[in-house]
Amino acid sequence: MDEAELCRTFAPRIRLYGLRHLDGAAAADDLVQEVLVIVIEAVRAGRVREPERIASYVLGTCRQVAQGGWRGERRRGELLAQHGELLAPDPSREPVIDVDRLRGCLAALAERERTIVVLSFYDERDADDIAIQLGMTSGNVRVVRHRAVARLRACMGDA
Amino acid sequence: MSHLAELEMIAYWAREGDPAPVEDHAFACDACARSLERFGAIARAIPDAVRRGLTTGAIAGLVARMERDGLRARHYRLAPGGSVQCTITPDDDLLVAWFTADLANAARVDATWTMNGVPIGRFEDIAIDRAHELAIISIDGAMAKAWPDHVAIVTLVAVDDGADRPLAAYTFDHTAFKAPA
């Protein structure tokens, strides 16, 4: 895998990791650059010899950087200067969500489905908490949420 | 290699459980990475959709979250058989109706809604805030701003074995906001 392919393959996955673990899209984009710089440097230095190990190396680097465990500002700056275009996030390949269409799709859900989706992804409550709040079982919350997300995806043309 | 289940991807974006097994798999699997990205795109867009306006059953904590996010809510709290003079102003993002009722033995609750005596709709199986024994409905302000003067009656109905059991009715005497001449 050459460096361009490595970036194309893993940049979206690193960004997903950042969106899940860090605060906002800008932090996720920073993580992409930082991790790719470290990985490219490791590949050039021959520290990642087995191609099948690259995914776990990238993920391990994500975890380390996200926890603040890597400091290489000077080297990072040099590599960014050399490969800035390659390492820049490519927003054109991300799924685009029409938020007004999504509002319509949310409105079309059954009442309980909509409430559970909003409690999960807006109010950031887990299934156990929602179950207590609504007098349901956690398993039932997960089933309703799964069904609701499937309906949203279908409504958004993503199923 | 088996792929990630949808339930696992939904739980990942709902921030439930250990994310590591999902990430271990997705970093090594093109198809699952793309699926996880699509699930995530929808999940992460939901807060924007809520902030732009959404009518939904709620719990007290959700209403508080919306207000912390800067949404301006006008609240009306009604006891069974109660009525209230209500309105909405351009500054309001939400109308929040808080209905108290004896909901303890009602597994499923529907809400019917009439406007000047004309049936408008029936909201089936609304979520009940069991911690407070309340039915709470948050109404998109943009929708409420289009309402004319009218009298609305909301009736909560328990549905037991397919049969309706009225719980309580609530009257809203709504005055449409009129901008100063």
Image (cartoon, coloured by chain):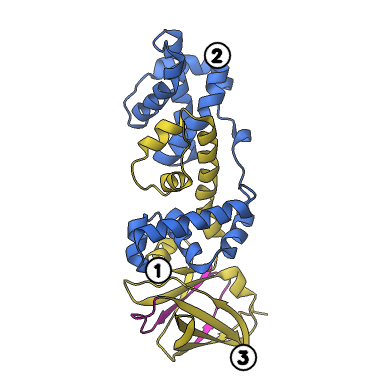
Question: Is the residue A136 above or below the residue B6 in the image?
Answer: below
Residue B65 magenta-drawn?
no
Q: CA distance from mark 3 to mark 1?
A: 28 Å
* Circle 1 SS class: loop
Mark 1 — on which chain does it sit? B
Question: Which residue is at a point 31% across and 71% down the rendered structure image?
Answer: B131
Q: Position of residue A72 (x, y in %)?
A: 37, 18
Asked which quadrant contains residue B160, the reply is bottom left
Picture layout, residue A78 above or below residue A114: above
- Give the color of chain A as drawn: blue
Marks 3 and 1, the one that precedes in the sequence: 1
Tag 2: Cα neighbours inside 10 Å, few (<14), some, or many (≥20)? few
Compared with B111, A96 (above or below) is: above
Res. A142 image quadrant:
bottom left
The disc labelled 3 sits on which kind of residue? Answer: Gly
Q: Within 10 angstroms of label 1, few (less than 14), some, or many (20 or more) residues? A: many
Span of residues in magenta = B84-107
Residue type beneath disc 2? Asp
Name the spot of residue B35 as percent of width and height, x first. Answer: 54, 39
Q: Amino acid at mark 1?
A: Ile
Crowd tier of the residue under label 3, counting other residues whose Cα lies within 10 Å: few below 14, some 14–19, many 20 or above: few
Measured Cα–Cα span from mark 2 to mark 3? 70 Å
Instruction: Specify whether residue A22 is in view.
Output: no
Q: In the figure, what tint was chain B given?
A: yellow
| Label placed on residue B117 | 3
Q: To which chain does the residue with label 2 belong?
A: A
The chain ID associated with circle 3 is B
Question: Residue A2 bears which disc, if any?
Answer: 2
Q: Which residue is mark 1?
A: B59
**Visible in this render: residue A50?**
yes
